[in-house]
Amino acid sequence: MIRYIVRRILYTVPILVGVSLLTFLLFFGIASPDTIARRNLNIHNPSQAQIKDWIQKHGYDRPLPEQFERHMESLFLFQFGNSDATKEPILDRIKRGAIPSAQIAGLVILSSLVVGLSIAMLVAYFRGTYVDTSGTLICVGMMSIVYVVYVIGLQALLGRLLKYGPIAGYQHGWDAWRFVLLPAVIGLAARIGADVRLYRTFLLEEIGQDYVRTARAKGVREGRVLFGHVLKNAMIPVVTTTVSTIPLLILGSLILESFFGIPGLGTYLQDAILKNDFAVVRAMVFLGAVLYIVGLLITDVLYATLDPRLRLE
Amino acid sequence: MAMLAVGCGNDPYPRGEVSKPVLLSGFGDVTSFDPATSFNADDGVLMDCVYPTFYRYNIYKRSPSVLELEAGAKPPTMKRLPDGREDWSYTFRKDLVFADDPCFPGGKGRIATAADVVYSFKRMADPDCACPVHDYVADKIEGFQQFGAGFKTKGKSHYADPLPGVFADPRDPFTLHIVLVKHYPELSYIMGMHFTTPMAHEVVERYGDGLTLYHMVGCGAYKMAEHLPGEKLVLVRNSNAHFEEFPQPPPGVPADVSRDAGRPLPITDKVVFTHFREALTWYNLFQQGYLDYISAVYSTVQNMPAATTLTPEMRARGVKLRECVMPFSDWLAFNMLDPVFGGYTPQRRKLRQAISLAIDSDAYSDVICQGLAKPAQFMIPPGIEGYDPKYKNPYRQYDPSLMRAKQLLAEAGYPKGIDPKTRQPLVLKFDTFADTPALRQMERLLVQQIQALGVRVEPREGDYATYTERMKSGNFQFAFDNWIADYPDAENFLLQYVKSNWEPGPNDSMYENPKIEELYKKIARMDSGPERVKLIREARDIIVEDCPKIYLAYQSEHELIQPWSTGQYFPAVGNELVKYAGVDPHLRTELESQWNRSNLWPLPLFAGFFVLGVAPAAAAIRQRRNRKVRREKRT
């Protein structure tokens, strides 16, 4: 397995270079250095001399291969430099923003595992009854609603009308839980429909296996069959699908963060794209790629750990 | 959910903060707090609390805005030199002291002198600072351009060299001399902008780039205690600040505004600004009482349902609504170099005038701006010298029948909007940066109105960068644009018709008229007065006939203010308002607790529904299993 992990880590190098190259080309394809300078210079009508100065100062006047080489070197050393727009050290901001993003993502994932699996078990237990049918129907309905509707609607309902939590803001330290609970509940509501459907499929697939029939034939109680055997085996696909979504959740809760005024990484990336802040965009894309690769690697390792039939080679 | 409902509360601040005499406000995206470079309204609101200038805008005078002394000790005097140059003397207060900061010896702030203002002017000349108002003063202050060029060869050591046109009086360290090579009345406004604040060189030398976001060290009423970008910014009273008191109000000012008149400023010792992105979030927090005031402009109003009128609930709560027309104009610009719409022949003029007559400014103000704007007749908004409330632009009088517009269009050579060359409707390409719902709605409305003439309008949407790129390169026919004045003077609006300001400058239409050039030069060098007003109106009439732009609206700002807030009076210009703002923390705590009681009743209801929903299924399963067992027993 160690050899497999080392090989996978080595594979990440060309992937990261490829992703960075694509971002680099896309960014320069969409925005010329002139446009980047105009967006980041804090002036309504910058003169050509000011634009030229800015481009020179930020190194965007160098040949593209040289820029890319410097860009890759700094990214692999995790020296992200300063934001083009605000001169703020990017790494400091990433470190600060990663905490609230990870808190929300962690809560959403954990609660979706617990709540999603519980509901899926319930639906699977009552399979064939109206609970199963109406559960499936509700799940499909929930999956059909656009994410932003959950955010705006539930923020208004739970935050503004029922006043169950702060509708915006963030405090560091122990107080942070007050601010991430409501977004996490909304994040959970937005994905629970899809999760329950998925977990139900995994559970029903296991329920149809021979070992379940054998257990029942031996007189094992239904609860024991479900929780002791079916759940254990269904956890393999459940865990692997969940782990692989962690990086996406950390970087991707930008709508939630935006509406709840949470200073996480999602909003940081969103702002950088809007401001043509290439220094931040390249760092965030690189970080996203690293997290995604690490997430997939953990998934593979977990898969092999949970299912003894698999061997990683 | 239960945890949320029971344990959380919805207070977004650290526990107990709302019960303290702390002003709670929000802030938008900030880009830089460096007084030499920052030119963003959101930055200005925060910076102007820290960096005082010679002049400030009187809090009570809203239309027109009036400058008064802030860091200045007495009004400036002018001595004409034998060669015609002007030597202006600005005497600063002697009690201006920088806030304590580690950059000063022993961490104690020192006295600010005229040398610190000279240093600010040197920073304005430094190309590295890219000062936004550099071009305004460059050809007026003696030796300013040459001094700026010196940085190329000498680098930062050039700061030690004298700037010929700006220096401290050798006999009085608190008097600043500015030598002008030509008369420049707008210098007063520049002396009221943060670019000319006394700036300690120790701060720049110590913090460098950090000055952009993390350090604000001035001699104003507040100093920055903490800034977490994208999160929050805290200002606290600067104990070294000079004494100033809340001015006495003129008649007619609301009682809540002047409640603290006569008290020393700042009224509130601490201000917490929290960063929020979504207008809806601002509005919701205000509704819950967690923001002491919020403002709405037309780009955000669609997300703030009751920002333009008070709902009965808000009225019952004692919320106040104040409106102020800003020096901010919206318009549509024709590219005067465009082969179809540009030029100065009678036909081209008529074509532009016809399109101008097809646009209904009332609809724009009411539908798009939702009442947060006043229909415009010309570029110069209310409160600015030269604005005439009775003036009616002959090409902005909308008539739903479009009779005159159609007639002008036919006279321009496009009867019923048909291009005789192609026998197809004339095509007009319309550039916008429709990146908000309000702007997209505006685009649809304008397209619909112009198309009523029979021409075809092709919108070219893009993000702001693409739109700017097209505008700057002159690659457009007709585009939406706007302008917020740098200072409340007609010159700052008329500069948009001067050839030296063609794109990438503010003259987006690339308009050119020798008569206007001549008038502009006179207006720019003339002091306020009836003669100047006459010239401004003469320029207006010429421009209106040429019709390089279609004036849409003057934007206004609406402020929603909580019942416990005082001193909230928003002038059209000027940012240093926070120091006048006060709160009644007891009333705030009391009302907030009334407004924010959690509604717990849905929780047992939800649990009940769940149990009731699942119980029959559980019974059915039990029944099914019992049947199975009975069958097995029988067999």
Image (spheres, rainbow, N blue to C red):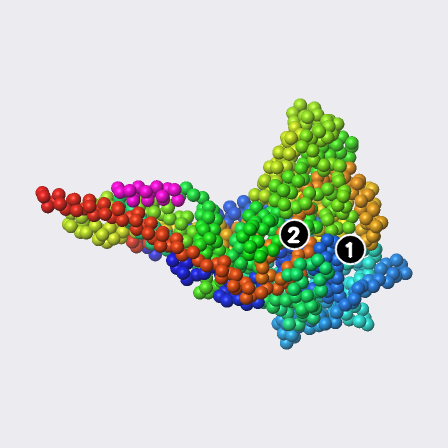
Name the foreground residue: B529 vs B129.
Answer: B529
- Residue bearing mark 1: B186
Which residue ends up furthest to the left in the rendered image? B635
Note whether residue B269 is visible: yes
Mark 2 closeness class: few <14, some 14–19, many ≥20 residues within 10 Å: some
Residue A132 covered by magenta stretch: yes
Chain ID at mark 2:
B
In the rendered structure, which disc, 2 or 1, sits on the residue that comes first in sequence?
Answer: 1
Distance from Cα at disc 2 to Cα at disc 1: 27 Å
Please give the chain letter of the residue carrying mark 1.
B
Q: In terms of depth relative to the viewer, which is nearer, B556 or B584?
A: B584
Q: Secondary structure at mark 2?
A: strand
The circle on residue B57 is none
Crowd class of label 1 (few under 14; some 14 to 19; many from 20; radius 10 Å): some
Q: Nearer the viewer, residue B503 or B451?
A: B451
Secondary structure of residue under mark 1:
loop
Magenta stretch, residue numbers: A128-142
Q: Quadrant of the C terminus of chain B?
A: top left
Image location (x, y in percent) of residue B379: 73, 45
Q: Could you tell me which residue is drawn at 23 percent across and 54 percent down?
A: A228
**Residue at image mark 2:** B323
Co-location on one chain, circles 2 and 1: yes
Residue B426 in view, yes or no: no
Amino acid carrying label 2: it is Glu
Where A34 falls versus B82 (above or below)?
Answer: above
Main SS category, magenta section: helix
Question: Is B362 covered by the magenta stretch?
Answer: no
